[in-house]
Image: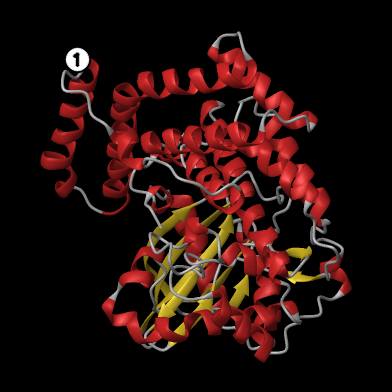
Amino acid sequence: MLDGEFNAQLGQFIGRIFPGAQVIDVQQLTAGASQQTFRVSVRNREGHETNYALRRAQPGLERSTYGQVTPRVEAELLELASSAHVPVPKVIESLRSTDGLGDGYLMEWLQGETMGQRIVKSPELQIARENLAFECGQALARIHAIEAPDRLREVLHSVSPEDLVRETWQAYIALETPQPMIDFTAQWLLSNLPSQSDIALVHGDFRNGNLMVSEQGIKAVLDWELCHLGDPMRDLGWLCVNSWRFGRRDLPVGGFGTVAELVAGYEAEGGNCVDRDALHFWEVFGSFWWSVTTLGMAKTWRTGETPSVERPVIGRRSSEAQMDCVHLLIPGDIDAASLRRVETDLPTSVEVVSSVRTHLTASVLESLEGADKFLLRVAINSLAIAERELQLTPALEAEEFSRLLALFGEGQLSELRWKLVNALRSGVFPDASGLHKHLRLSVAGRLSVDQPTYSALAPR
């Protein structure tokens, strides 16, 4: 809930930039780890009402975290992008220290669809989807052509592909959780680094979910807080990551287009010739990075840094990204149906969890609205994960243990998991065919618990 001090300071800020105007409503839309977004409704002195969007740093987190830019820098990037004809919201005014609202800025409010699931499925956007991948290529070419001034280059993060892989891998190792597919992917990435890469302004989070789309096409490119200097192919690869296709695994660009369409738009707008091997590398890296980042989000919940009901569920999405790495690097058969087998004599704990989940879904969910309804959906999803965990894990772990014994011999399950991880980290792999089969089935089994409807479990 917004407190009185915030409302008063916001009112003074609006009055400063729009003399005589009043705030008539303010709603918090997002509360990310580093930034907040609000919709601010304003009535001017003539009585006309207009909506604006306010972005600001989370209170107490006004300094940028590693790899992220501050809202003040983000506002400057939006203005540069606008000058380069990239569709973005117009920045109205940046906050001053005297406003008392922290670091942030006010921008115009645009109308369009931002939900990735709706962008790939909505009948109203069918015509827009036909050209959307090409438009994404055009927008990325314009972003990568922007010449950042020296003052921005001094604050923007810059990192080579190799350092980026090693930083991400070390972040995972620090979490002290054995996830062999992550180590396998890290070794593949280090062995397949791009032979050469340009340095350009990179958006850093250009994907379906950070685009606003209307019936006419891309309305705005949003969320520039991960902008940095690096290989521009990273943006193209990130857009192709399966996590952002929202079930349309057959359409690799955001769930709405083909790689050929994306590349055609990029090169037609003056972007450099796209190296398909580099594009594949960055798609693999995107799933690798997301598999590690989601685990890190779960840790912030454990430590109490972000006590949100959503964080543990996001942590479970690591298996989705790991399964995408499986398909990209060691494709093969998985018996998805067998991973979802149901025991006929359910343990009491499963029945209890199931009854609670059913009650919340049938009797409570529809009585809520807004953020409360969203968070209850997350809680129901958490219960469903726990239900599958209780139901499926014993058989899955028995099969995993059997495969690890075949690879390494004696040991307990936890010991054998670490033995495999340490072997992968040292670069000394066990039998390749047995290893690949084990990784495929283990990640698929984990995903059948975490999210059995994720597209990577479905046969191609």
Residue lying at 88% horizontally and 72% vertically, measured from the top left: 150
Is 339 placed above or below 205 here? above
Q: Position of residue 109 (x, y in %)?
A: 45, 76
Q: Is residue 65 left or right of residue 444?
A: right
Q: Is residue 452 left or right of residue 62?
A: left
Q: Is residue 222 left or right of residue 368?
A: right
Residue at which label 1 appears: 348
- Quick one: label 1, few (<14), some, or many (20+) residues within 10 Å? few
- Under mark 1, the amino acid is Thr
Instruction: Give the quarter of the image for residue 187.
Output: top right
Residue lying at 55% horizontally and 42% vertically, measured from the top left: 294
The one nearer the camera, 220 or 90, is 220
The one nearer the camera, 21 or 353, is 353
Is 395 placed above or below 15 here? above
Q: Position of residue 164 (x, y in %)?
A: 77, 50
Number of marks in picture: 1
Assign the C terminus to one quadrant of the image. Answer: bottom left
Residue lying at 61% horizontally and 41% vertically, measured from the top left: 292
The residue at the far left in this view is 363
Q: Look at the image and tell me whether residue 363 can be seen.
A: yes
Instruction: Give the quarter of the image for residue 100.
Output: bottom right
Q: Look at the image and tell me whether residue 44 can be seen.
A: no
Q: Is residue 6 left or right of residue 62?
A: left
Residue lying at 33% horizontally and 82% vertically, measured from the top left: 126
Is 176 placed above or below 237 here? above
Q: Position of residue 88 (x, y in %)?
A: 57, 79
Is 419 placed above or below 284 here? above
